[in-house]
Amino acid sequence: MATELNQASSRKSPRSPEASGIADLKNHVVQIEALQLYTFIFIGVLFAVERVPPFAGNEFLLLLVVSVFFVGLRLVVHVTNPKSSMRSRLTWAAVVGGATGTVLGALADVATGGLTLGQGTLAGWAAGAAAGAALGDRIEGWGKDMVERGEAFAYLHQHRRRAPHLADPGAVDAALERHIPSYDINQDGRLWYAKEDLRKFVRDGPVGPANGPERNP
């Protein structure tokens, strides 16, 4: 009897969409708190570098600190649900800009004996920020095999011009409801789709109902 009770208690029960939404909200609140702490630490370190001997007046160290904090921003901004192109582009502009600024700044200072006055770092920031902003969405999506329904809808809808079976939002909605397999991978009521299934549907179109009859709202 005790074994059965332990087995029953160890089973995961599906969470409602409302409970999942509350969990997401908590994650965002924690992220905001982390960003505030990160900002306070950043200000404190900058003050130390600018005012406290023997660091005071060291422009290379000041630029290096800023670059390192830019790179570390992605460790703090880790909650990416719901998807936001603006957030992805700004985050990766800072990260890539900080990384290239550090590398180019160091190379320029070594090559000139420290005579660049930070221009190499500034050039690295500009080039890296431009690249990160342009590729932010793609970088954010690297390594992700599964996407949520909203992202899957956006992916199908953006291919509507070359796929007649996705000509309008209604067709996209029907495809996600009836033809493309979906998975409740977290048992929280939210549907996830495999990128490979989405690409296959764009290429081949409907081949039969995968999810059964269309669900009524």
Image (tube, helix red, strand yellow):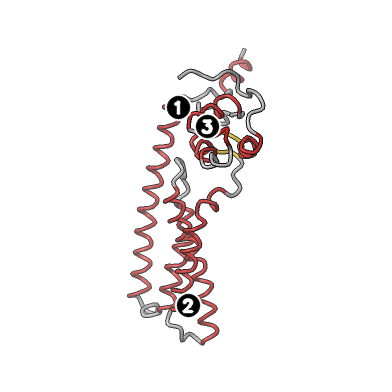
Q: Residue at x 37, y 42 (%)?
A: 29
Q: Is residue 77 above or below residue 43?
A: above
Residues 18 and 199: in front is: 199
Q: Give the image location of residue 10, x and y in percent.
A: 58, 24
- Calculate the distance from the C-alpha at mark 3 to the C-alpha at mark 1: 22 Å
Q: Is residue 15 above or below residue 141?
A: above
Dividing the picture into quadrants, the one containing residue 8 is: top right
Q: Is residue 17 above or below residue 75?
A: above
Q: Are marks 3 and 2 in contact (CB under 8 Å)?
A: no
First-in-chain label (3 vs 2): 2
From the image, tell me which residue sits under label 3: 172
First-in-chain label (2 vs 1): 1
Q: Give the image location of residue 56, x and y in percent.
A: 36, 78
Looking at the rendered structure, the secondary structure element under dot 2 is: helix
First-in-chain label (3 vs 1): 1
- Calculate the distance from the C-alpha at mark 3 to the C-alpha at mark 2: 48 Å
Q: Give the image location of residue 123, x and y in percent.
A: 46, 74
The quarter of the picture where the C terminus appears is: top left
Residues 128 and 10: in front is: 128
- Please give the label number shown on residue 120: 2
Q: Is residue 92 above or below residue 210?
A: below
- Calculate the distance from the C-alpha at mark 2 to the C-alpha at mark 1: 50 Å
From the image, tell me which residue sits under label 1: 17
